[in-house]
Image (spheres, rainbow, N blue to C red):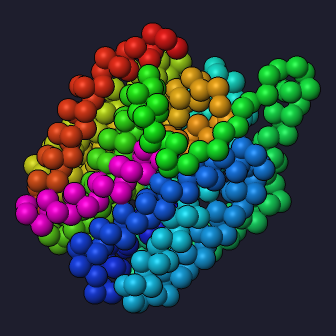
Amino acid sequence: MLGVGIIIPTFAYYTENTGATLTEYAVLMSVYSAMQLIFTPIWGRLSDKYGRKPAILGGLLGNAASLIGFGLASDYVLLLFIRSFGGVAAAAVLPTVMAYVADVTTDEERGKGMGLMGAAIGLGITLGPAIGGIMGRQDLPFFVAGGLSLLNCLLVFIILPESLQQNTQIEEQNIPKRHHEWVSLRSIFRWQTLTSPLTAIFLISFFSSFSFMGFETVFPHFIKDKWSYGQKEMGGMFLVMGAAVVLFQGGLLGRMINMFGERRIILSGILLHVLGMALLPTATPYFTLTLYLVAIGIGSQIIRPTNASWFTKLSRSGQGTVIGVMDAFSSLGRILGPLLAIWFHQINIASPYLVLSSCLIISTLFLYIPLCRVERNT
């Protein structure tokens, strides 16, 4: 996530300088998530069967190759291919790591574990934009991020134990073995899944990802068009946002999940996210703009780990498969969000935030009762 953070301030401007239009830039953002939609459930199933560590290693190697290749490429078709390959690699890493956390924590500890992992994500996004923002060359962040991914791969190979070995020890104590299922796109979006009581959690993942990814896609162009800000200013704002996310997730999220339950935390995150999005067009630089960004960041970044914590407690299938299904819905949101946001940005630079926040709050109102039912049946 440090590598992801490093390229955040420069990605939009780098693609623009290669001659890509706003629509082509949105396609680059969406195709990455499209590959995750296709491959995350597959990686989840494979990590359930063959282990978390091989999936993480393969994903990190592929991620390094795609980042370095992106920094070297200047042709749009090549950028599109490399970005697609990067999405396949990314599908193996974060969902598998979340499944790893679920492997090594009890139901009572899982909220804390997911919160700490969210804090690690936030720390990467905190330091990353600050590092990327001060780099003069726009291709340099991709090379640095790729190098970090290679270093990370080496550390995983040397240090990280395989979490599924703990499951084997549990089975030897006559605790039932987790069931593993093959998960494909067809099986994920079959009628039985869409009518499942847990579909409300899936849809929250979809709409929150849809909203945040739409925001992230247009934000660099929004601050450039309105205030002529660039990667340095954006890096500073994301530094503040990431610091706030780390403090909240690392120190409070796990305890708040245990105290108030996942449903209330998710709803609070949505409200905070919507509030920041709705106010963003009225921001004045630099203080209020950063303040609203912090609200969006905290709100959105507590939804994903809380969702994962809740869903893994409810599911009896393999944890990799569970996270894979949830991430498939998130990926679908990340595919559609950039395309819609760029389309509205070209009409009016303020309209994407109003549309995205409206979609999220309306969907939450419709899902409120189903979420209450899930909580009662937990």
Looking at the picture, does residue 370 appear above or below residue 270? Answer: above
Residue 12 in sight here: yes
Residue located farthest toward the left when viewing the structure as drawn: 348
Image-based side of 156 in relation to 313, left or right: right
For residue 361, what is the image quadrant?
Answer: top left
Magenta range: 328-348
Q: Position of residue 366 (x, y in %)?
A: 25, 25
Is residue 213 covered in magenta?
A: no
Image-based side of 103 in relation to 311, left or right: right
For residue 365, what is the image quadrant?
Answer: top left
Q: Position of residue 31 (x, y in %)?
A: 40, 66
Q: How many labels does the image show?
A: 0
Q: Which residue is drawn at 42% across and 34% down?
A: 191
Residue 246 in sight here: no
Secondary structure mostly seen in the magenta stretch: helix
Is residue 343 covered in magenta?
A: yes
The residue closer to the viewer here, 321 or 251, is 321
Q: Position of residue 315 (x, y in %)?
A: 59, 26
Looking at the picture, does residue 130 appear above or below residue 182? Answer: below
Q: Residue at x 70, y 51 (%)?
A: 46
Q: Which residue is drawn at 81% across and 33% down?
A: 167
Q: Where is residue 92 in the image (x, y as percent from the top left)?
A: 62, 56
Residue located farthest toward the top when viewing the structure as drawn: 376
